[in-house]
Image (cartoon, helix red, strand yellow):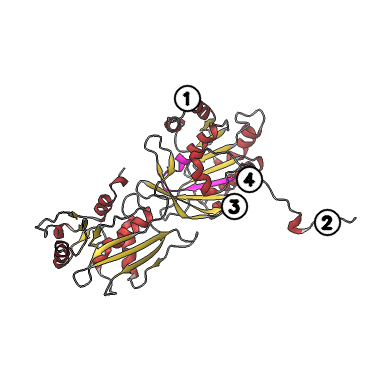
């Protein structure tokens, strides 16, 4: 019997990766990356203080509870700060679990030059007599911690070699990276090509939308996975608002038009592409100005995203400046994946400094007349400029006027729970 020799890709075996077990607390993380494997190289990027280190510590503690050893290489914070944060994260564990987790996370502060990483791995980790022999997970926090320039090609090549050696040894690596002012991942362009999985974390008030634009172990996740930090332990967890919600903001355009709606959707653009705005019938420059204003709100990173905007204007098709406030609120609601209460009405133009500019007096007077005549269902909450609010002299039960000096006021009073 002649056995046909396998050739081409048929002769290449399928490599099976050993998955590192994570607890149910990190089920959201496993959902994002599909597989957390030994030898996997994971890169997370985001602004300072956004939660990159938090996730690294959280994974290390989770593995540590099961006896899995982690090396946490520190290039920015001290081991005292790391220990303090880790103990806080363990505050909801039993004493046995806490001690097991903490003893299995080894802080390492002696790596002053990233070129020494391959030698460190060889002598201290892979050597049976090395201090960290048996390690399954390494966190490098961060790559740029010593002020590493994107042009430091030789040093980055050693980082890549370190990752290659870890992959061969079945050691998972979690690289923490900075982002530039433009929101790009810090370092050379080939950094992303030398890792298996890229995670990008953004800010959205108290939320931390997480994206996975590259993943060799599963599908990319381009729809935001909104996270938030537990107030007691500071652990990252899935936000209860994890499902997309309709982002519709109502406005009032006078007696001749009545109630109108601004609808918006925000999404991550195809990775590597700039965001684009799809707003049929609306002036692009006006919309770009509004998105710039939103990005100026503290902890609101909404640049370089895709926007799809629709305005339902019964009886007219012309864009008007007073649609600025409702459009901004619809965009923000979509980004935060928060609902806007049905009884809210937003009226106002937004200037370059996020101020809510005055509207024609007749608009607010017509709105109040419609409310008094019962043409608009109560309860109702109207967000408008301060001077417009001062025009309302007669109170109506179930109707509230919210004076807004800036866009920030409308956001804060719509979702007070977002304040830290």
Q: Residues within 10 Å of mark 3 (few under 14, many from 20)?
A: some
Disc nearest the viewer among 2 and 4: 2
Q: Which residues are magenta?
A: 38-57
- Residue that badge 2 annotates: 5
Image position, residue 71 (x, y; %): 55, 34
**Disc 1/disc 3 C-alpha distance (Å):** 37 Å
**Disc 3/disc 2 C-alpha distance (Å):** 29 Å
**Secondary structure type for disc 2:** loop
If you read the primary sequence from the N terminus, does the residue marked by circle 1 or circle 4 appear first?
1
Q: Which label sits on residue 272?
A: none
**Disc 2/disc 1 C-alpha distance (Å):** 58 Å
Q: Which label sits on residue 95?
A: 1
Query: In the rendered image, which quarter is residue 399 located in?
Result: bottom left
If you read the primary sequence from the N terminus, does the residue marked by circle 3 or circle 2 appear first?
2
Image position, residue 397 (x, y; %): 15, 54
**Secondary structure type for disc 3:** loop
């Amino acid at each position: 019997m002649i056995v046909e020799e396998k050739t081409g890709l048929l002769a290449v075996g399928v490599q099976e990766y050993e998955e590192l077990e994570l607890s149910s607390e990190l089920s959201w993380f496993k959902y994002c990356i599909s597989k957390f494997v030994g030898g996997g190289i994971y890169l997370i990027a985001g602004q300072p203080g956004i939660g990159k280190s938090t996730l690294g510590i959280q994974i290390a503690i989770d593995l540590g509870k099961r006896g899995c050893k982690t090396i946490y290489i520190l290039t920015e914070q001290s081991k005292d700060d790391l220990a303090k944060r880790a103990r806080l994260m363990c505050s909801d564990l039993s004493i046995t679990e806490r001690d097991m987790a903490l003893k299995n996370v080894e802080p390492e502060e002696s790596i002053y030059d990233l070129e020494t990483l391959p030698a460190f791995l060889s002598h201290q980790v892979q050597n049976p007599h090395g201090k960290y022999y048996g390690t399954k997970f390494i966190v490098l926090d961060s790559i740029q911690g010593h002020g590493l320039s994107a042009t430091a090609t030789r040093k980055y090549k050693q980082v890549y070699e370190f990752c290659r050696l870890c992959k061969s040894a079945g050691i998972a690596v979690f690289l923490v990276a900075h982002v530039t002012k433009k929101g790009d991942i810090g370092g050379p362009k080939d950094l992303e090509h030398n890792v298996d999985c890229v995670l990008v974390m953004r800010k959205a008030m108290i939320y931390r939308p997480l994206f996975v634009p590259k993943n060799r172990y599963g599908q990319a996740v381009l729809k935001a996975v909104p996270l938030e930090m537990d107030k007691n332990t500071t652990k990252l967890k899935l936000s209860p608002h994890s499902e997309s919600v309709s982002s519709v903001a109502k406005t009032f355009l006078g007696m001749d038009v009545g109630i109108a709606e601004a609808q918006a959707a925000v999404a991550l653009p195809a990775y590597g592409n700039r965001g684009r705005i799809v707003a049929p019938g609306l002036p692009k420059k006006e919309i770009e100005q509004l998105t710039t204003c939103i990005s100026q709100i503290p902890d609101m990173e909404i640049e370089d995203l895709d926007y799809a905007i629709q305005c339902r204007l019964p009886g007219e098709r012309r864009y008007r400046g007073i649609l600025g406030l409702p459009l901004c609120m619809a965009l923000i609601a979509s980004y935060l994946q928060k609902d806007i209460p049905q009884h809210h009405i937003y009226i106002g133009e937004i200037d370059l400094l996020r101020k809510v500019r005055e509207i024609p007096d007749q608009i607010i007077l017509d709105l109040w007349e419609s409310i008094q005549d019962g043409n608009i269902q109560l309860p109702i909450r109207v967000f408008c400029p301060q001077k417009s609010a001062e025009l309302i002299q007669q109170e109506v039960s179930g109707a509230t006027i919210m004076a807004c000096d800036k866009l920030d006021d409308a956001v804060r009073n719509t979702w007070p729970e977002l304040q830290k």
